[in-house]
Image: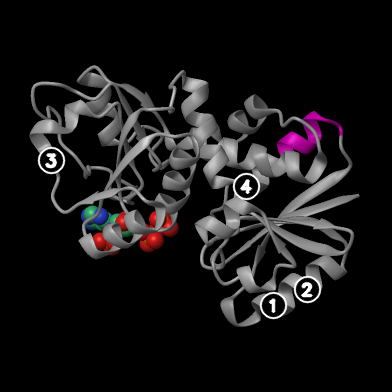
Amino acid sequence: MLKLGVIGYPIGHSLSPRMHNAALRALSLDGEYSAIAVESAGLTEAVRGLFAQGFAGLNVTIPHKQAILPLMDELANSARVIGAVNTIVKVDGCMIGHNTDAAGFMRGLTNAGFNPAGARVFVMGAGGAARAVVYALCDARASVVVWNRTYERAERLASEFGVDAIDCLPMGTLGRFDLIVNTTSVGMSPHQDQTPLQFPMGERTPQWVYDLVYRPRETRFLREARAAGARTIAGLDMLVYQGAEAFTLWTGLAAPVDVMRNAIMDS
Ligand code: ATR
């Protein structure tokens, strides 16, 4: 039996078990994906213990994505550059750390029909999620500008990835970007009345808007962007695709993304 799971703390609200168990069933695989509460103090012991018990792979979520790095035997390029691991695969007794957030983000974009090569992208936020987004965009040869409430973090992230940072929202000229991405938590339930940006934002609306927040399904930011004429991509897409990428790393199979999406749609 394929033993999989997600470790984090708290972990009760994770949607990953529903998504992955639905995928395992859809492909008639003998496996089970569980949510495992692991506190920071017991991280090393818990991870070693789970793999000793026969786990083949794990997802890693808050607060362990960075702390887990030194425990890995090897890191995929994405995990090393982003500085965070969200997926562990056990190969020949070794723990390999991956980061599927970047690929999940990019799959959400390209699936919607956006071509990132040469595109001008405005990224809001400079936390862990922003690092995965900027990594993915740079890898796809987009031109990136980062803004963050705390400018120093934006500046640090930008200099590390060789992109630009700005210290105030260029409201009148945001329309010159092809895509705006929200990686901040602004607008997340229970604060769904908030938005990181108000529309209209000058004479032009950016053509594409992507919000990583997935609770609610359509944030105020996306709703207003859509009303202003932008094409929108929801955070649920990135959530499903990062899971799909992890599923493929563990099983070697194409993930049933529609099944995974349906499994968490009404949550
Ligand atoms: P994650 O891993 O999800 O990116 P994080 O590393 O805690 O989480 O980063 C949260 C991001 O949301 C940061 O960019 C944060 O801005 P600061 O660096 O200034 O803290 C941003 N953020 C959170 N609340 C915000 C708010 N009310 N207004 C603007 N930005 C906010």
Image spot of residue 189 (x, y percent): 34, 48
Circles 4 and 2, Cβ within 8 Å, touching? The answer is no
Disc 1 from disc 2: Cα separation: 6 Å
Q: Is mark 2 within 8 Å of ligand 1?
A: no
Q: Does label 4 or label 3 sit earlier along the sequence? A: 4
Q: Is mark 4 within 8 Å of ligand 1?
A: no
Q: Which mark is residue 16?
A: 4
* Amino acid identity at mark 4: Ser
* Amino acid identity at mark 3: Pro
Tell me the residue that label 3 is attached to.
170
Can residue 133 be spotted in the picture? yes
Left or right: residue 206 compared with residue 168: right
- Pair 1/3: label in front: 3
Q: Which mark is residue 44?
A: 1
> Which quadrant holds residue 182?
top left
Q: Label 2: few (<14), some or many (≥20) within 10 Å?
A: few
Image spot of residue 199 (x, y percent): 15, 30
Q: Does label 3 or label 2 sit earlier along the sequence? A: 2
Q: Residue at x 13, y 50 (%)?
A: 168
Which span is picked out in magenta? 22-28
Q: Residue at x 67, y 48 (%)?
A: 17
Q: Main secondary structure of the magenta part?
A: helix
When the figure is inspected, residue 232 is found, relative to residue 102, above or below; the finding is above
Q: Is mark 1 within 8 Å of ligand 1?
A: no
Image spot of residue 16 (x, y percent): 62, 47
* Amino acid identity at mark 1: Thr
Disc 3 from disc 2: Cα separation: 48 Å
- Pair 3/2: label in front: 3
Disc 1 from disc 3: Cα separation: 44 Å
Circles 1 and 2, Cβ within 8 Å, touching? The answer is yes
Tell me the residue that label 2 is attached to.
48
